[in-house]
Amino acid sequence: MSGAARSGGTVVVGASIAGIAAVEELRRRGFARPITVVGEEVGPPYDRPPLTKAVLAGGDPADCALRSAEWPEEVEVEMRSGTRAVRLDLGARELELDRGERLPFDDLIVATGSVPRRLPGPSLEGVFTVRTLDDALALRAALVPGARLVVVGGGFIGAEVAATARRAGLTVTIVEGEATPLARSLGPEIGTLIARIHEDEGVEVRCGLPVAGLEGEGRVERVRLADGSAIEADAVVVGLGARPCTDWLEGSGLTLGDGVVCDSFCRATADRVLAAGDVARWDHPRLGQVRIEHWENAVAQGRFAAGALLGLEEEPYAPVPYVWTDQYEHKLQIVGRPGPDDDLVVVDGSFEERRFLAAYVAGTRVTAAVTLNRRASAMRARGMLRDGIDLPGLLAGFEGVKQTGGVIA
Amino acid sequence: MKVKVDYEECDGHGVCVDTCPEVFALGDDDDEVTLLVEEPDEALREAVSRAVGLCPKAAISLEG
């Protein structure tokens, strides 16, 4: 059978922000052939950042809808919600779906995202992860004022949940195996600051001890730490990061390696198969092989993959990563990619006033910048990072601003 | 082409400023962006469209 006779058009697997962005970009660029979106979750696509904040705090889940109910019709896309792709057959250029159906495709964009890591051991009631809207709503029901919540893992998700739960009147403990929250991604100085912000709000932050396990009879009762001590809990949130959703691609012939391995144009190792968002590990011209789990990258990479599919992208995909986190009244923004051994230099403001711009520096080269409650500076630094910049250059770029803190690390 | 910013939503991320500084600005002490041009030149359509898509709060819309 010829490809043309059974044309499947373009199939996007994943109905979250990367997939949606890819679809919209294909249409915006004039792509007129059929597009099908296969999405595992039932219901219309929604935005994930509000899940740990507004939704958890009692907001209307409808407020985080990504698009209107009319969207599929407007962009002429067939939505296959509540449908999971279980296998990829590259030879036949078909997807196998969870009810046995086979879906042919000419082009494939993999945007299946990531799933939270869990703790080993039997599943217990009262233990939550936060990835989906259903996850957030289930956790929300457990956020009863006065209840004791233990957050395992002090990353972005864990810290945001802790902040929201604390504001909802719970007794909150963050348990982090590293020396500080966010240590691996942002280093000990920012980690210590985040810990202090939480402590000032009345959250207990216990660092440096891994969790040995969760205990309880059917329902979680306590979190056991590696030194044998325990923290009593009415509910536990596990925020130990995520792994890319590539299980369904095992054995397909696509090269996998902590994600779908792609070239610098987001093309996977098969013809006309691309990947975008959390699931994609691509060859970034400046950063090497990276996989980025940030909202803004999911959108930008979804758009890029669409352009690359159409042969319209001339330069490799080389963004300066951007991520933010909102905790209590604070907005922390990070542009670039801090290295584990970088020094942190305060450029403007100070940790004390909780308003600053600081640069991550390797030698004299600036690798990333972080701001707390200093929105304009984050994006100015991002522009400078795009062209590559050293510390004197960055300081000069923030005209009239003198270095206030010196090297902290 | 007409650009609108929903200031109920805008949280001052500044991605639009980074994407299309001809149309959006963010002052040093501001928590929300300023729209510099309501009806930008057609040549900026690509950049404005990108700003619309990349806004973390979906606060920007483009008409026409």
Image (tube, grey):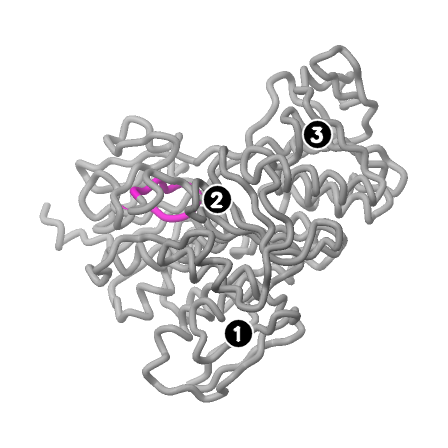
Q: CA distance from mark 3 to mark 2?
A: 39 Å
Where is the N terminus of chain B found, in terms of image quarters? bottom left
Where is the C terminus of chain B found, in terms of image quarters? bottom left
User: Do discs 3 and 2 share a chain?
Assistant: yes
Would you name the residue on which mark 1 appears?
B60
The chain identifier of the residue carrying mark 1 reads B
User: Cβ–Cβ below 8 Å for labels 1 and 2?
Assistant: no
1 vs 3, front mark:
1
User: Residue A55: within the magenta?
Assistant: no
Q: CA distance from mark 1 to mark 2?
A: 34 Å
Determine whether, in the image, residue A159 is placed left or right of residue A280: right
Task: Using a 10 Å C-alpha cutoff, classify the residue at mark 3 as few (fewer than 14 neighbours), some (14 to 19) or many (20 or more).
Answer: many
1 vs 2, front mark:
2
Mark linked to residue A127: 3
Would you name the residue on which mark 2 appears?
A361
Q: CA distance from mark 1 to mark 3?
A: 38 Å
| Picture quadrant where residue A311 is located | bottom left
Where disc 1 sits, the SS reads strand
* Magenta portion: prevailing SS class: strand
The chain identifier of the residue carrying mark 2 reads A
The chain identifier of the residue carrying mark 3 reads A
Image position of A17 with respect to A156: above or below: below
**What are the residue bounds of the magenta stretch?**
A274-283
As drawn, the residue found furthest toward the top would be A228
Kindly identify the amino acid type of the residue bearing the numbered disc 3.
Val
